[in-house]
């Protein structure tokens, strides 16, 4: 438990203290955000606000994790923890390139779709292949070839090749979903912090009832649950610290550097904790935001009419007259409800598995 608290505290401190430095440096370099012309007119005042703040989230997460292992942790960094962090960092690099191109070309479009998908493909393939390696003395690898909800479902098995393909779809879907949600000050960062906090609880619970240490009914066959909790805690602390400067009115945006990295982190966490389908509930806000874009495109292509005033979904409410802060707070509440519902399902499954429910 100490390592989890230390990781969160270090990442929080680094994020709060390092982000103002990035704001000054990026402002001097002219690394300002370009705004969609067709977006809400109130957003035009944000043009020029420093972006690529996801660098602070990435650095704070990495520092929090590794400093914890250098100071209070009794165990070395695990394969699961390192793989999830590597996935996060790789997608962060893809996002950084996307942001940098936007800035240099002074437009709201960075990497084209093909280039971004290739970057996501490389990150997902590396993670998918490596996550099926590094078996421990129980034969457990960081990820499993079985589809999972709260734990592995033996009736649905992808096989090694199928899992790599699944990993690609999961990484692409979640990184894009968080990216689409990152359209209002603090919306994606605050929502991601809630999901990450939930994963701290889930991973720690799996550690408490790890079959390797506590072979009882309802125990979990998950590799490295405590170290995964440390990763989630560090990322949560980094998001909260960044939110100090990113909350409305934002002094810096996370950009694709942060949103793609956080989406990849969530995808990695769901696979190493065997909660792939549960994340659909925990990250329900991200799912709705991505779904709103898909529905908008589908309806427009078939009927030439718009389902929403603007997609992603949060802009629909802005154009309907809601204040930006109202949209943010209400969407945060939706994110919190999704996390509470998902955590309740996780706990109720454990009660049923132990016969206590």
Image (spheres, rainbow, N blue to C red):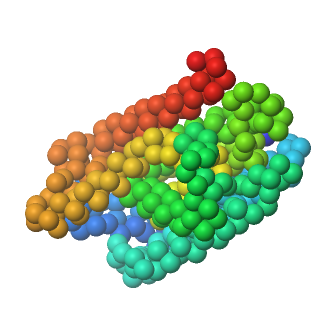
Q: Is residue 178 visible?
A: yes
Q: Residue shown at 57%/65% (left/top)?
A: 162
Q: Residue shown at 75%/48% (left/top)?
A: 223
Q: Nearer the viewer, residue 186 or 134?
A: 134
Quadrant of the drawing holding the C terminus: top right
Q: Quadrant of residue 114?
A: bottom left
Q: Which residue lies most toward the right here?
A: 74
When the figure is inspected, residue 309 is found, relative to residue 118, above or below; the finding is above
Q: Position of residue 319 (x, y in %)?
A: 19, 50
Total count of labels:
0
Q: Position of residue 196 (x, y in %)?
A: 58, 43
When the figure is inspected, residue 64 is found, relative to residue 293, above or below; the finding is above
Q: Quadrant of residue 83?
A: bottom right
Q: Which residue lies most toward the bottom here?
A: 105
Q: Which residue lies most toward the top here?
A: 356
Q: Position of residue 265 (x, y in %)?
A: 59, 55
Q: Residue shown at 40%/76% (left/top)?
A: 113
Image-based side of 246 in relation to 181, left or right: right
């Amino acid at each position: 438990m100490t390592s989890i608290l230390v990781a969160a505290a270090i990442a929080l401190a680094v994020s709060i203290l390092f982000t103002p430095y990035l704001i000054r440096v990026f402002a001097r370099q002219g690394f300002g955000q370009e705004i969609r012309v067709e977006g809400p007119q109130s957003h035009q005042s944000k043009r020029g606000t420093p972006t690529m703040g996801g660098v602070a989230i990435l650095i704070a997460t990495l520092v929090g994790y590794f400093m914890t292992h250098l100071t209070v942790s009794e165990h070395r960094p695990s394969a699961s923890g390192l793989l999830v962090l590597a996935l996060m960092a790789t997608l962060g690099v893809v996002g950084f390139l996307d942001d940098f191109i936007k800035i240099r070309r002074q437009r709201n479009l960075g990497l084209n779709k093909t280039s971004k998908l290739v970057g996501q493909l490389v990150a997902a393939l590396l993670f998918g292949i490596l996550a099926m390696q590094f078996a421990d003395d129980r034969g457990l690898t960081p990820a499993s070839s079985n589809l999972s909800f709260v734990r592995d479902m033996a009736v649905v098995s992808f096989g090694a090749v199928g899992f790599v393909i699944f990993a690609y779809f999961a990484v692409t879907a979640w990184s894009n979903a968080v990216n689409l949600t990152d359209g209002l000050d603090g919306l994606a960062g605050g929502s991601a912090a809630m999901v990450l906090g939930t994963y701290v609880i889930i991973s720690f619970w799996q550690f408490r009832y790890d079959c390797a240490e506590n072979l009882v009914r309802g125990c979990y066959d998950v590799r490295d649950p405590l170290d995964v909790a440390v990763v989630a805690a560090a990322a949560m602390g980094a998001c909260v610290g960044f939110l100090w400067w990113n909350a409305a009115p934002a002094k810096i945006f996370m950009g694709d550097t942060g949103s793609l990295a956080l989406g990849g982190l969530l995808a990695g966490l769901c696979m190493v904790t065997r909660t792939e389908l549960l994340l659909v509930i925990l990250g329900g806000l991200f799912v709705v935001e991505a779904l709103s874009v898909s529905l908008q495109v589908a309806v427009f292509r078939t009927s030439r009419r718009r389902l929403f005033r603007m997609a992603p979904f949060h802009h629909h409410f802005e154009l309907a007259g809601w204040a930006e802060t109202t949209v943010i707070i209400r969407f945060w509440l939706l994110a919190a409800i999704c996390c509470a519902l998902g955590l309740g399902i996780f706990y109720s499954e454990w009660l049923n598995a132990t016969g206590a429910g």
